Image: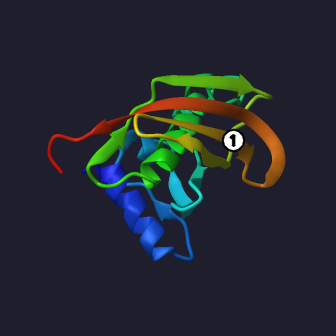
Amino acid sequence: MNPDHALLLDFARQQPDAPVAITTNPLAMDLGATLVAADAKTGTLTLGFVPDARFVQGNGAVQGGIVAAMLDFATAFAVLLQLPPDRSAVTAELNLQFMRAAKAGRFVAHARVRRRGGMLAFAAADLVRADDENDLIASATATLPLLYLTSV
């Protein structure tokens, strides 16, 4: 099983009171990613992010590819949360809408599975400022093929 998947399932089962650092993925660690909330039944997930200075451009904004990475993590993790251990998902398509510059700071991504079939899942996520949930930075929709793992 993918270590990210195992962490997600464990987090959803335990429902801890405080965010849990994502330590299973080097990029997630670099982005200061944390699991904030997860509900496998509804396919909803909240991740926190604090990208460090390496990802901030000269104008004080987080680079757009990093914003995309945060939204990709959120949509993929929401789908993984609903899959059994012998399945996985990969992002085949990620559509982004940037609403404003992501000035350096803390962010929260709210993701949800919109539909999951036997071979494909569709998910969406919004990235907001952690200190202002109404300050929408970017949105994404994703299409993820669902895979069977050859060994569990």
Q: In the rendered image, is residue 32 in sight?
A: no
Residue 63 in the image: above or below residue 45: above
What residue sits 36% from the left and 52% below the top?
A: 5
Left/right of residue 76 with respect to residue 142 in the rendered view: left
Total numbered circles: 1
Q: Which type of secondary structure does the marked residue at label 1 adopt?
A: strand
Q: Residue furthest front?
A: 118
Closest to the observer, 114 or 128: 114
What residue sits 68% from the left and 39% below the top?
A: 104
Q: Residue furthest left?
A: 151
Residue 46 in the image: above or below residue 100: below
Write down the quadrant of residue 141 in the picture. Answer: top right
Left/right of residue 48 with respect to residue 150 in the rendered view: right
Closest to the observer, 148 or 38: 148
Left/right of residue 128 with respect to residue 84 in the rendered view: right
Mark 1 Cα-neighbour bin, 10 Å: few <14, some 14–19, many ≥20 = many
Q: Position of residue 56 (x, y in %)?
A: 61, 30
Q: In the rendered image, is residue 136 in sight?
A: yes
Q: Position of residue 1 (x, y in %)?
A: 24, 51
- Amino acid identity at mark 1: Leu
Residue 39 in the image: above or below residue 81: below
Residue where numbered disc 1 is placed:
127
Q: Position of residue 70 (x, y in %)?
A: 56, 38
